[in-house]
Amino acid sequence: MGRTAVLALALALLCTACSGADGDAGAAPATTTSAAPALPPVPGIEAEVVRQRTDVPVPGQVHVRVTDTGDQPFTVTAVSIDAPGFAPLPPTPLTAAFEHGRTIALRTAHGPADCAAPAGPPAARLTVARPDGAVEELRVPLAGDDLDVVHREQCAVAAVLAVAGVALTGLTAAGDTVTGTVVLTRARDDDRAVTVLEARRSVVLDVAVEGLPLELRTGEERTSAEVVFTAASCEPHVLAETKQPFLFPLSVAVGEAEPVTVPLPVDDTQQELLWDLLDRVC
């Protein structure tokens, strides 16, 4: 995957610091994917969903940690997530050989959160080949609450953006800075105030939004503020290894709700301007 594609994915990331506001706060419904009764176990196989550090910069990725708890070996040839609250995706093909006691973490994609879906227990759909050549399609209950966390994060952000959209416009380069405008635009017939309380830097770039807090007041359709980007780190290993160079978390509150962390969107052209800034300064 090219640099631009990787960064575009990173910018879609819903930051792990997201707060799940509820009720009249205008954030995500207080539901989880593990509230319903547990699924029946599958003899000889246990599974857990985990979001590893390497998954965080990649939207839609987790790991399914599978353990052979039986006395027979088997091979997993495909895996997918089956969880209420997430759009289904086709299975990911792979080959992972298990024997008694072995645990392997299988990288797995999950679909976007469906914030209107009822809660329910998550499962992993595994295609399993047995030593005698038999192939089974199994639905294995998933332990762990990392999918619940992802669902809350994504739905909290979606609830904020349903009230007011966030945009970055008009980027221009000048010397050791890039300047532009952060714009809040009312997105629906919801007249609550929307306030950007804080803008946090990325791994390699500082960001400063003029005159924070930036408030879209009741009755306003649009408001904006100047934003300035400057280099925060020129360390070669930081520049080479960062997977989220243009992830700028904004702390955004709707009405009296607790703030939610919403990423400032940065498109491909804007990313190139910011890369050029780093190239000039560093």
Image (cartoon, grey):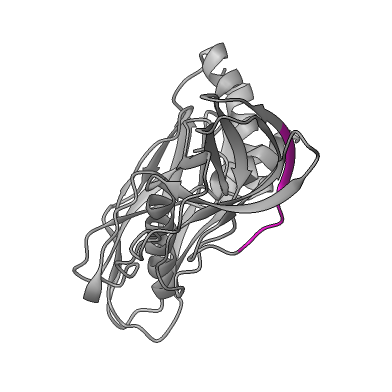
Q: Does residue 74 belong to the magenta stretch?
A: no
Query: Camera-side residue: 263 or 220?
Result: 263
Residue 19 vertical position relative to residue 43 in the rendered view, above or below: below
Residue found 41% across the figure and 46% down from its top? 143
Residue 162 vertical position relative to residue 273 in the rendered view, above or below: below
Residue found 26% across the figure and 57% down from its top? 259
Residue 223 visible (yes or no) = no
Q: Residue furthest left?
A: 256
Residue 94 appears at what percent x and percent y? 74, 37
Residue 24 vertical position relative to residue 278 in the rendered view, above or below: below
In magenta, the rendered stretch is 88-95
Residue 91 appears at what percent x and percent y? 70, 51
Question: Would residue 26 be found to the left or right of residue 9 on screen?
Answer: left
Residue 97 appears at what percent x and percent y? 68, 28
Residue found 35% across the figure and 61% down from its top? 32
Dividing the picture into quadrants, the one containing residue 144 is: top left
